[in-house]
Image (cartoon, rainbow, N blue to C red):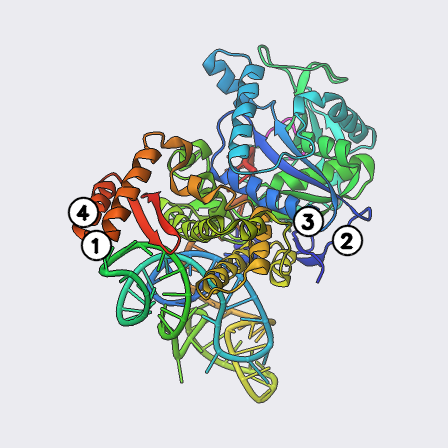
RNA sequence: GGCAGGGUGGCUCAGUGGUACGGCGGAGGACUGCAAAUCCUUUAUUCGCGAGUUCGAUUCUCGCCCCUGCCUCCA
């Protein structure tokens, strides 16, 4: 079966057929870089990273574009508070963002355009909108999009203009012809960053940047546009209205929206203050735990974030690593299998092709893992299974460390003296050979006090750090 | 109120018109000097509630209840 994608625009799964054979263009709404990213942001990034990887796995040459919103009210406010230039703040946050993404094994997109570096494209698009009668300059000099002029407005989110208006609780802006109209270009206020334009000095509205940058990098019609569920309306609706009206292209053909991250069944968000930043979480949990946690639920469903949930994922990952350790400890010839070119099982391919069903893909990983352990226990060959496991885990970006590094605590736990532990293991095994179990247990207890757990296997004794 | 998406074992998470995938946890067993790890067995007559379609529904249709998101900046 070929790749099926749930398209928000159609409200059903559709077979993915790219605009250009062998190629795929994908735009994902990035972040407004005024602060560190939280787990909600991590989800979009990880979800679309897997989608990106899968499209490449299927052989597509993918042009993956993810923007940075680096001009915005919040950025200006935050920079003012800190007494620094907005650009200083955004540069700093982009660096932090990349550190988070690297930690989470998210591959870099093909392009990461910044809004401030695409002013010309935005101004061009706004000009086209005015020329074609879709936009107007308001009394106070802002350029606004005339929503009622665009016939298909509401198609993506399933909203009807009249119902929207009646349900509106927003203060009506008198300078707008219609309360639904949204800003394309704002007049500059003193002390704010501003760019020259045909409508005077000012800055772009939020929605226009995504329309302009996606079309600039991917063309007026492209394959995939993604983002969080909360962006469906009005952001994505407005993007469509702008782009289609301006250049007559179809804009994105497949719209993908990931579910939100909740805390206690409530959306994680800056405004509610119930968020955890990625770097905060990574102080406590390995990034693979967070990544696997995010892939453990289908991308369109909401997911509840908690330490307890991460703990459970950690236990599961440990088991995967136990298997990896067994394989790493094997003889040279078999060890090579671990790094041999991978191959994916039909079940895994089927799961991923079915709208990127990562929970099912993970189930396949656990089953393969169990199969390997069973065969190893029985002394049977495992080459096919190992190649499958390796291919699956590297595709999803989990179990990517050496097992020893994983169990020994990695770089963060420099206080662990491996040589000392190894020496004690030698002593203890000598005692065990002499059947001096009191001495052997004493050594094991001594290590246990320091959170070192020993495991006596057929191939010798290994150790790991307790959580 | 409108729109979108959900309610599956103790928890979590897939899925299917013919009695349900994985993970965590629980119980028993094998292995072990004892452990740990691993493996094996076991743990939902049942998929929010009611009705309908059907030989048969958790899966399709309708109604109801409950939850979340969006309708304002938000991944």
What whole-number distance in Å separates the C-alpha atoms at marks 4 and 1? Answer: 9 Å
Residue shown at the point (83%, 32%) measured from the top left: A132
What whole-number distance in Å separates the C-alpha atoms at marks 1 and 3? Answer: 54 Å
What whole-number distance in Å separates the C-alpha atoms at marks 4 and 3? Answer: 54 Å
Q: Nearer the viewer, residue B37 or A429?
A: A429
What whole-number distance in Å separates the C-alpha atoms at marks 2 and 3? Answer: 15 Å
Q: Chain of mark 3?
A: A
Number of residues whose C-alpha sits closer than 10 Å to that of mark 4, classed few (under 14), some (14–19) or many (20 or more): some
Q: Which mark sits nearer the N-terminus, 4 or 3? A: 3
Q: Nearer the viewer, mark 2 or mark 1?
A: 1
Secondary structure at badge 4 equals helix
Residue A331 % position (x, y): 50, 51
Same chain assignment for discs 4 and 1: yes
Q: Chain of mark 1?
A: A
- Residue range corresponding to the magenta coloring: A173-178
Residue shown at the point (43%, 39%) measured from the top left: A405
The main secondary structure of the magenta stretch is loop
**Residue that label 2 marks:** A17
């Amino acid at each position: 079966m070929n790749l099926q994608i749930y398209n928000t625009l159609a409200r059903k799964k559709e077979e993915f057929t790219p605009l250009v054979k062998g190629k795929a263009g994908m735009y994902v709404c990035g972040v407004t870089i005024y602060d560190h990213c939280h787990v909600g942001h991590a989800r979009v990034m990880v979800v679309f990273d897997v989608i990106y990887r899968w499209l490449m796995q299927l052989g597509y040459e993918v042009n993956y574009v993810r923007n940075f919103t680096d001009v915005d009210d919040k950025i200006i406010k935050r920079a003012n508070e800190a007494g620094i230039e907005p650009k200083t703040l955004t540069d700093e946050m982009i660096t932090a963002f990349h550190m988070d993404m690297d930690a989470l094994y998210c591959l870099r997109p093909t392009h990461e355009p910044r809004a401030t570096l695409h002013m010309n494209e935005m101004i061009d698009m706004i000009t086209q909108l005015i020329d074609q009668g879709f936009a107007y300059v308001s009394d106070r000099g802002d350029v606004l999009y005339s929503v009622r002029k665009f016939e298909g407005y509401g198609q993506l989110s399933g909203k009807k203009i009249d119902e929207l208006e009646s349900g509106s609780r927003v203060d009506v802006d008198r300078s707008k012809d219609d309360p639904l109209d949204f800003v394309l270009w704002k007049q500059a206020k003193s002390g704010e960053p501003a760019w020259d334009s045909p409508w005077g000095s000012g800055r772009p509205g939020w929605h226009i940047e995504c329309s302009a940058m996606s079309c600039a990098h991917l063309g007026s019609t492209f394959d995939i546009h993604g983002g969080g569920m909360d962006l469906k309306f009005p952001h994505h609706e407005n993007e469509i209205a702008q782009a289609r009206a301006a250049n007559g292209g179809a804009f994105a053909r497949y719209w993908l929206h990931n579910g939100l991250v909740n805390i206690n069944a409530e959306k994680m968000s800056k405004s509610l203050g119930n968020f955890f930043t990625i770097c905060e979480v990574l102080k406590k949990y390995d990034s693979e735990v967070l990544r696997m946690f995010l892939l453990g639920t289908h991308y369109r469903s909401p997911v509840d974030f908690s330490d307890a949930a991460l703990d459970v994922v950690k236990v599961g990952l440990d088991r995967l690593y136990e298997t990896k350790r067994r394989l790493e400890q094997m003889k040279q010839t078999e060890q090579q299998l671990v790094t041999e070119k991978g191959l994916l099982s039909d079940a895994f391919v089927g799961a991923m092709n079915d709208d990127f069903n990562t929970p099912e893909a993970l189930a396949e990983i656990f089953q393969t893992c169990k199969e390997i352990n069973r065969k190893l226990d029985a002394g049977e060959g495992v080459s096919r299974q190992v190649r499958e496991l390796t291919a699956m885990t590297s595709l999803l970006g989990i179990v990517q460390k050496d097992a020893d590094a994983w169990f020994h605590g990695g770089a963060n736990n420099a206080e662990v003296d491996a040589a000392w532990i190894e020496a004690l293991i030698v002593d203890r095994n000598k005692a065990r050979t002499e059947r001096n179990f009191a001495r052997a247990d004493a050594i094991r207890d001594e290590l246990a006090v320091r959170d070192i757990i020993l495991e006596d296997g057929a191939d010798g004794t290994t150790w790991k750090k307790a959580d």
